[in-house]
Amino acid sequence: MRADLEIIQQWVKPGDHVLDLGCGDGTLLDFLKQERNASGFGLEINPDHITTCMNRGVSVIEQNLDTQGLDNFEDNSFDIVLMTQALQAVRRPDKVLDEMLRLGNEGIVTFPNFAHWRLRWGLALSGRMPESDALPYKWYNTPNIRLCTFKDFEALCRQKGICIKSRRVVDGQHQNNWLARFWPNLLGEIAIYRISREKI
Amino acid sequence: MPDSLPVDSVGIVTPQTYHFETPIELACGQTLEHYDLVVETYGELNADRSNAVLICHALSGNHHAAGYHSKGDRKPGWWDTCIGPGKPVDTNRFYVVSLNNLGGCHGSTGPNSVNPATGKPYGPDFPVVTVSDWVKSQALLADRLGIECWAAVVGGSLGGMQALQWSLDYPGRLRHSVAIASSPRLTAQNIAFNEVARQAITSDQEFHDGRYYDFNTLPRRGLMLARMVGHITYLSDASMGEKFGRELRDQAYKFGYDAEFQVESYLRYQGERFSEVFDANTYLLMTRALDYFDPAFEFGGDLSKALAKATCEFLVLSFSTDWRFTPARSEEMVNAMISARRKVSYAEIDAPWGHDAFLIPTPRYTDIFTAYMDRVAREVGA
């Protein structure tokens, strides 16, 4: 069991209506459908992933967040909006966060931590852009154009008045890592944030 | 037909005529006392009758969707690229039903059939039928075939409109609705093109107010023009450019008005051939059915409200260069389904052939269609 799926599942209520931005091959939505009887849609642009979703019975819409936005979705039309490992690949993560919380009561966001010690170490030592399990690309072909650290993300949330309800940290293989709990911004590779609008 | 049957062909098929004696009441208020539907089927109905797929045809289509009628046939059915053993609509797994719609001109009761009240062809007296009427007659056909619930209702263009209408009129009788290169309603531009086609037909001197059968003639010119203008809307600028460019039939301009460019002679040829095999009154009727199709109308234009009744899952596909029913029209459907919380999957397929792309197999189109139908088959145990 991937730890991230297990963690996300705990935050989804039975029967929740879910939107998954960048749903990949539909693993998460399929899992939530089976474990939580969740309904909903995934958005994806990778043709192979879209075909896989359709074959496994996950409702998938071909839609590009950068060029098409999310205007076709109505306010508060979902219980939860998910975005796993895609925030760093969109042009305006800040606007996507706003949209997530316009469409859903809650958002769940996961992304790789650019301040993980191995990346810091790699950059410091070699002077080259770092690569890792969570970031396995070259600087010139990476889809990850908006890399940030856990601290950066939390600062953005504070600035936007977004409430961080929970945070869990896992390693690059999406497994729990007890060390990362002590010093997440140095030792955590991937964070899973549960966010909502600040209560007024 | 090729010398030997392709292995992925359904082979030689024979249409069957089903006669219906119970009157059918139509949306226009008129009733057809009795009528025929011509049907082809491919594959075997399974024991629990769960693997039936209905294929709905577009404007000029008919029941002959796949295979060959005889060894002498030059071409297979109109959707042979997608229906057959191992094809997206896999006849090894599905029982496929394809009919000629009411009002058609290929054997089902239509304007060129004999009106029992007069002993002459109906002609203009044949009632204008709607997409809903077709769906109703298809449901009656399903009753006759012993099919309580379709695994899927599938169609392209006007056929996709029938697939959508099915989900609204008989929500409990289909598991999946597949609408390819379709639209939830025509735009003003779409209706305008249809009107040009109709004007071409009705202004032909040989039309005789639709009673040309009585005069032993056909409005060939009008129907040819209608087909020519229609045909342009099925292709893309790029695909016409690729196929014909500015190529001339001879080396030089002749400074006249005969068909000098290849594209002109192609359109004339297509139009002429069509005018010999298609009925002008059916063409009028089909274009009107297109114009009238608007399931959101009675819901104040809100398609998502109309979709509240639907329970099936949807697959919607569009093609990047289709300017007759653009991807935006498909997205209109998809957005209404999202808003109504129906299960829907959507993809826009990159293909250069305009509206006709739904008839042409491209790798991504075939992959998606196959993947989706494979899942439908698994779901019904086929």
Image (cartoon, rainbow, N blue to C red):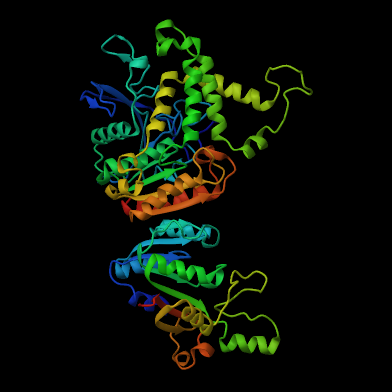
* Residue B353 rendering spot, x and y as whole percentages: 58, 40
**Residue closest to the far front:** A200
User: In the image, B217: left or right of B43?
Assistant: right
User: Where on the picture, by quarter, is residue B164?
Assistant: top left
* Residue B372 rendering spot, x and y as whole percentages: 42, 52
Query: Which residue is drawn at the image coordinates 37% and 15% (left, top)?
Result: B123
Q: Is residue A62 above or below residue B320?
A: below
Q: Nearer the viewer, residue A73 or B26?
A: A73
Query: Which residue is drawn at the image coordinates 49% and 30% (left, top)?
Result: B192
Q: Quadrant of the C terminus of chain A?
A: bottom left
**Residue closest to the far left:** B22
Q: Is residue B255 above or below residue A38?
A: above
User: Where on the picture, by quarter, is residue B52?
Assistant: top left
Residue A2 in view, yes or no: no
Residue A127 in view, yes or no: yes
Query: Which residue is drawn at the image coordinates 38% and 62% (left, top)?
Result: A75
User: Where on the picture, by quarter, is residue B98?
Assistant: top left
Q: Is residue B311 above or below residue B122?
A: below
* Residue B68 rendering spot, x and y as whole percentages: 46, 29
* Residue B127 rendering spot, x and y as whole percentages: 32, 21
Query: Which residue is drawn at the image coordinates 47% and 22% (left, top)?
Result: B198
Q: Quadrant of the N terminus of chain A?
A: bottom left
Number of marks present in the image shown: 0
**Residue closest to the far top:** B215
Q: Nearer the viewer, residue B74 or B20?
A: B20
